[in-house]
Image: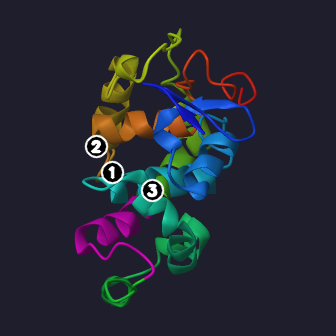
Amino acid sequence: MLIDEDLITGDDGRKRCRWCVGDPLYQSYHDLEWGVPVSDDHRLFEKICLEGFQCGLSWLTILKRREGFRRAFADFRFDEIAQWDQRQVNRLVKDSGIIRHRGKIAATLHNASRAIEMRRDEGSLLNFFSRYLPDESPVPGRLADLPAITDESTRMSRELKKRGWKFVGPTTCYAFMQAMGMVNDHLADCDFRSTNR
């Protein structure tokens, strides 16, 4: 494997964004998921919740527990989660397969009710999130070119908070936008930039 400042060249000869080096799970996520547009409301809800759990942690930490999160949170079926109560929060705080942060767990249950309201008001979560697609997405040449927040992620965060969502700051919203293919932040020379669009 060859590593330069911003890209790695794997044993398969393909160039990748350097942030995915060091773990096969991370590389697979980079190659197959990151930046691929998603339209399913449950996957969108899952990702916005997991981005909230990531606050203060690495994405790889969350990724390694993603199956545990899916099991613990009923595959992020928000209609079901919205019916849960404090007993479920107490149960989940003891679940070693997830990040056991009481505030983030409670926020996921709270946000499930907000997702139901959003689907009722907007027709789908996708309809809401699609409003924040940028008119243009610059092609990053280096990792240093990637922003942490944008005007769109700031507006998304503001509107989500106005609707009562929790753990949805502008940085969290931008990471969500990157992951869900709302922006394409694979580097210009990454072999997966064009294959994921």
Q: Give the range drawn in magenta.
A: 97-113
Majority secondary structure of magenta residues = helix
Q: Residue 104 appears at what percent x and percent y?
A: 30, 65
Q: Disc 2 vs disc 3: which is toward the camera? A: 3
Q: Earlier in the sequence, mark 3 or mark 1?
A: 3
The residue at 50%/10% (across/down) is 138
Q: Earlier in the sequence, mark 2 or mark 3?
A: 3
- Residue 145 in sight in this render: yes
CB-based contact (under 8 Å), mark 1 and mark 2: yes
Q: What residue type is labelled 3?
A: Leu
Q: Name the residue under label 3.
A: 60
The residue at 39%/59% (across/down) is 111
Q: How many marks?
A: 3
The residue at 62%/24% (across/down) is 190
Q: Is mark 3 on a helix, strand or loop?
A: helix
Q: Mark 1 points at which residue?
A: 165
Residue 101 forms part of the magenta stretch:
yes
Viewer-proximal residue, 104 or 84?
104
Viewer-proximal residue, 184 or 135?
184
The CA distance from mark 2 to mark 3 is 26 Å
Q: Which amino acid does label 1 sit on?
A: Trp
158 w.r.t. 47: above or below: above
Q: Residue 74 appears at what percent x and percent y?
A: 58, 76
Residue 140 forms part of the magenta stretch:
no
